[in-house]
């Protein structure tokens, strides 16, 4: 899909509002013709017939009414054009976000968050002028000048021919210059996206930059990038001003020629043309009427040139959106299966291989089982493949070969949304969102009532600190849980899992980076959570694996040991050496 194809595909979403906007614009063009006719009649009557105010009053009141009606039509055209663009932006933003969600964290991990934020905000907003300005102007550019020509040609064919001859030069030069603007504008847009992405990445890592005394260096980098963007923006503006000057030149030239030809005939001067081409005489009323319409004839063409830059910006913005939408989605079964609602889950990894890139396997023939209501701990060094196992189980990625089985059904055959409804995931750093504590606990089950929220918090050993807060469960929290400690955030995340009542819970080192008191509270909540459901624990601390039914030791993408804590500690293997490193002598 190209950027132009994407823009064209969204037009049906705005078709109703665009048609209404064009209709109002065309009606405004008819009002312009009526306004010019009334104004010419009034001036002709006053200047040549000696009419007074009372004589022309019947013409003035309709003229005032037309002024007011034109203002109302212009306002209506703006509103409908805005609604057309808003409908497209809303639908397209929803489509892009849903596509990104379907691509999953594995795809997002390879993208810059700043670039994605730029695409979803400024990128989609960059389509505003294309739908609200360019598309209506493109239609009105054909309709309004045609309507004026149909009025002018019977009255004065010479002026009509001048308009007809000079009009094509405006879109011609607009296209010629616009081709140069398009390439520069696309380059400028990509530069803006890179600058926005870099700036957001720097803001997110500001604490680290301060700790390593690198903030001033990054500030200099941002200043250099900003200056480069300023230069490219000025280049776009130079081309834009050049195109505007060319359009104004031809429009002014056309109006001037019409005025000269009308003036010659009004003064009864002979035009330098053969007798058989000599135009007929013209009255003041006709000449003034045509002269009033001449600027209005070229106005849509000039507006089209201005809005053409909106098209260039939209194409540049759509290029990145196309790159996102063209990213291939994980393949799913044509007729996905659903599991029984309350059935306990049995999970099996059957000779699973996975590679993030050819020649470098993250998992190499991993096989293990998670029986219903069994707690399995997965341990191993960094980069051994623990997070890859979790991503496969959550459906974020698919095995290169082998199968992940759920109750003897391949995960690839299951309805992914239905499967995830049976899961709860407690990451190492849970994300809390702006809102109340109750709203954050309800994240996986928005319809839950207050009693269920309180019960989940109590089972996660979070009720005591929540109820001690000034507003209790209605206490607002900031982005990423601002205002709460790490242990409190973890217990709220575990309360989410209790409220969801998932059959399988995946914990990614829930007690990491916590003080001993918080770790003990979180560990009690984890033990309570594991009592009723299956659990896969990705662990680095002994406290989280000692009570596991089975411990899997993974290294180099392979399961090298498995058993309970006592068995593995007695063997001379990787787990025993890991325990010796982690245990601190009394």
Image (cartoon, grey):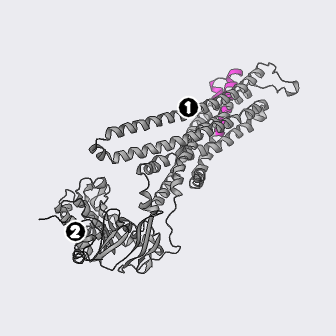
Quarter placement of the N terminus: bottom right
Badge 1: residue crowd in 10 Å (few <14, some 14–19, many ≥20):
few
Image-based side of 584 in relation to 185, left or right:
left
Give x and y (percent) for residue 35: 64, 34
Vertical placement of residue 152 versus 434, above or below: above
Dot 2 falls on a residue whose secondary structure is helix
Is 36 colored magenta in this rendering? yes
How many angstroms separate mark 2 from mark 1 (CA)? 68 Å
Q: Which residue is the extreme one toward the front?
A: 572
Which residue corresponds to mark 1? 238
Look at discs 2 and 1 and give the one toward the viewer: 2
Residues in magenta, as a range:
29-57
Quadrant in which the C terminus is drawn? bottom left
Residue 416 within the magenta-colored segment of the rendering: no
**In this figure, which residue is indicated by the disc labeled 2?**
579
Q: Residue furthest left?
A: 586
Q: Position of residue 434 (x, y in %)?
A: 32, 54
Res. 158 visible in picture: yes
Asked if 553 appears above or below 10 in the picture, the reply is below
Q: Quick one: label 2 or label 1, which is nearer the N terminus? A: 1
- Crowding around mark 2 (Cα neighbors within 10 Å: few <14, some 14 to 19, many 20+) is some
Q: Who's the residue at 28% across and 67% down the image?
A: 539
> Where does the image place residue 295, in percent across and percent down from the top left?
66, 31
Is residue 75 something one can see in this rendering?
Answer: no
């Amino acid at each position: 899909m190209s950027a132009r194809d994407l823009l064209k595909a969204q037009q049906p979403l705005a078709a109703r509002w665009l048609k209404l906007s064009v209709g109002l614009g065309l009606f405004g063009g008819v009002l312009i013709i009526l306004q010019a006719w009334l104004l010419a009649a009034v001036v002709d009557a006053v200047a040549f017939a000696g009419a007074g105010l009372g004589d022309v009053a019947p013409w003035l009141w309709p003229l005032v009414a037309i002024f007011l009606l034109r203002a109302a039509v212009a306002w209506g055209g703006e509103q409908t054009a805005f609604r057309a663009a808003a409908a497209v932006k809303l639908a397209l933003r929803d489509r892009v976000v849903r596509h990104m969600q379907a691509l999953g964290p594995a795809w997002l991990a390879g993208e810059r968050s700043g670039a994605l934020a730029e695409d979803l905000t400024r990128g989609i907003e960059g389509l505003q002028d294309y739908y609200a300005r360019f598309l209506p102007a493109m239609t009105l550019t054909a309709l309004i000048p045609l309507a004026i020509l149909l009025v002018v040609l019977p009255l004065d064919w010479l002026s009509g021919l001048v308009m007809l001859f000079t009009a094509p030069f405006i879109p011609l030069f607009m296209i010629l210059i616009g081709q140069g603007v398009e390439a520069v504008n696309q380059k400028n847009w990509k530069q803006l996206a890179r600058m926005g992405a870099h700036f957001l990445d720097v803001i997110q890592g500001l604490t680290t930059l301060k700790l390593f005394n690198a903030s001033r260096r990054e500030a200099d980098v941002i200043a250099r990038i900003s200056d480069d963007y300023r230069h490219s923006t000025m280049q776009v503006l130079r081309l834009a001003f050049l195109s505007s000057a060319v359009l104004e030149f031809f429009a002014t030239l056309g109006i001037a020629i019409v005025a000269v030809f009308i003036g010659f005939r009004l003064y009864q001067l002979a035009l330098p043309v053969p007798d058989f081409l000599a135009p007929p005489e013209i009255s003041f009323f006709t000449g003034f009427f045509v002269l009033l319409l001449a600027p209005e004839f070229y106005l849509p063409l000039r507006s089209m040139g201005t809005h053409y830059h909106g098209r260039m910006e939209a194409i540049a913005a759509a290029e990145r959106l196309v790159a996102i939408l063209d990213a291939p989605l994980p393949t799913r079964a044509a007729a996905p299966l659903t599991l029984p609602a309350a059935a306990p889950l049995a999970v099996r990894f059957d000779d699973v291989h996975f590679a993030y890139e050819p020649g470098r396997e993250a998992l190499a023939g991993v096989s293990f089982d998670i029986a219903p209501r069994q707690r399995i701990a997965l341990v191993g060094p960094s980069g051994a493949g623990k997070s890859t196992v979790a991503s496969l189980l959550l459906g974020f990625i698919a095995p290169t070969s082998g199968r992940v089985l759920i109750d003897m059904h391949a995960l690839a055959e299951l309805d992914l949304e239905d499967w995830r409804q049976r899961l709860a995931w407690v990451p190492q750093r849970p994300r809390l969102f702006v809102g109340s504590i109750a709203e954050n606990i309800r994240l996986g089950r928005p319809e839950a009532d207050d009693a269920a929220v309180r019960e989940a918090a109590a089972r996660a050993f979070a009720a005591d600190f929540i109820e001690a807060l000034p507003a209790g469960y209605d206490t607002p929290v900031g982005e990423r849980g601002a205002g709460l400690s790490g242990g409190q955030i973890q217990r709220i995340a575990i309360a989410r899992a209790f409220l969801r009542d998932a059959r399988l819970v995946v914990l990614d080192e829930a007690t990491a980076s916590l003080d001993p008191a918080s770790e003990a509270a979180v560990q009690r909540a984890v033990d309570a959570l594991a009592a009723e459901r299956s659990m896969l624990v990705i662990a680095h601390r002994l406290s989280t694996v000692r009570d596991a039914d089975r411990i899997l030791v993974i290294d180099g993408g392979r399961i090298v040991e498995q058993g309970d804590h006592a068995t593995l500690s007695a063997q001379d293997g990787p787990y025993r050496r890991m325990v010796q490193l982690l245990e601190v002598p009394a």
